[in-house]
Image (spheres, rainbow, N blue to C red):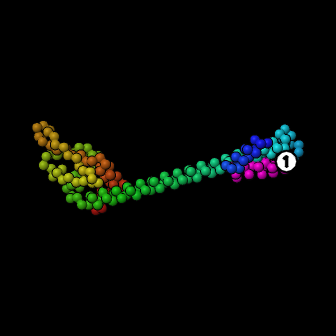
Amino acid sequence: MADFSAVIKVLLENRLVPTVMGLVSGAMIYAFSSEDNWMLLKLGKLGYGLVWAGIVFLFITFIQYCAKQCKKLLCYIKDKAEDIENEEEKRKELLEELWYFMDELNQDYIDFLKRFLDNENNYIEETIWFGPGYMRKFFKGREIILRREVQIDEEPKVIYKMDESFYLLLKESKEKYNRISHFE
């Protein structure tokens, strides 16, 4: 009996609600059971009440576990939705900055940038004196057009390529909003 009281003490300290509900339910089930119940005859009065108390305890514990897991899932879904919303907000702000940046460029430079959009950011080869290649423009601290001088057939040429992150942002703006500046 001392072992039983030690178990009850631990259960009451850590799992009070399911333990009390289990014990009360076990006593109620015993009270409403007939005296010739096969389980009651096999287990005895105390064993029969404890079996039902254990079954109710496990059932309530399972319900509590399921409720806790559902709360976790709902919190995760809510956090994920907020993260997506925040990411979209940041993306819109970045695109807005891009459009203000593009509004300040001259039309020759904008046309040059559009050529990269048309050729999917492949290299553009120009003569060494091509104007927009010498204009160093920076967006978010990074140069947007990368320039390299090469010799092709003994003729000096310059190869231009757009910074990949800037190209992807410009491409997203064109595909999603069908524009790359406020005035387009």
Q: State which quadrant residue 176 falls in.
A: bottom left
Name the residue furthest top: 153
Query: Is residue 120 a member of the stretch shown in magenta?
Result: no
Q: Which is nearer the eye, 60 or 93?
A: 60
What residue is shown at x 72% (from left), y 47% (from top)?
9
| Range drawn in magenta | 15-31
| Amino acid type at image mark 1 | Ser
Task: Give the percent coordinates (x, y) of residue 60.
Answer: 69, 49
Asked whether 17 falls inside the magenta stretch, the response is yes
Left or right, residue 165 beside residue 130:
right
Task: Report which residue position mark 1 lands on.
Answer: 33
Q: In this rendering, does residue 56 appear at all?
A: no
Residue 68's spot in the image, x, y percent?
61, 50
Q: Name the quarter where the N terminus is drawn.
A: top right
* Mark 1 residue crowding within 10 angstroms, few (<14) / some (14–19) / many (20+): few
Q: Secondary structure at mark 1?
A: loop
Q: Is residue 19 left or right of residue 139?
A: right
Instruction: Name the residue nearer the viewer: 110 or 147.
Output: 147
Work out whether residue 131 or residue 49 is closer to the camera in this orientation and state it.
49
Query: Which quarter of the rendering shows the C terminus?
Result: bottom left
Q: Position of residue 88 (x, y in %)?
A: 41, 56
Q: Residue at x 15, y 52 (%)?
A: 131
Residue visible at 22% across and 47% down in the picture = 146
Q: Residue extending furthest right?
A: 36
Q: Residue at x 80, y 45 (%)?
A: 49
The spot of residue 119 in percent (x, y) is 26, 46
Residue lying furthest bottom: 183
Using the rendered image of the protein, determine whether residue 164 is visible from the camera's viewpoint: yes
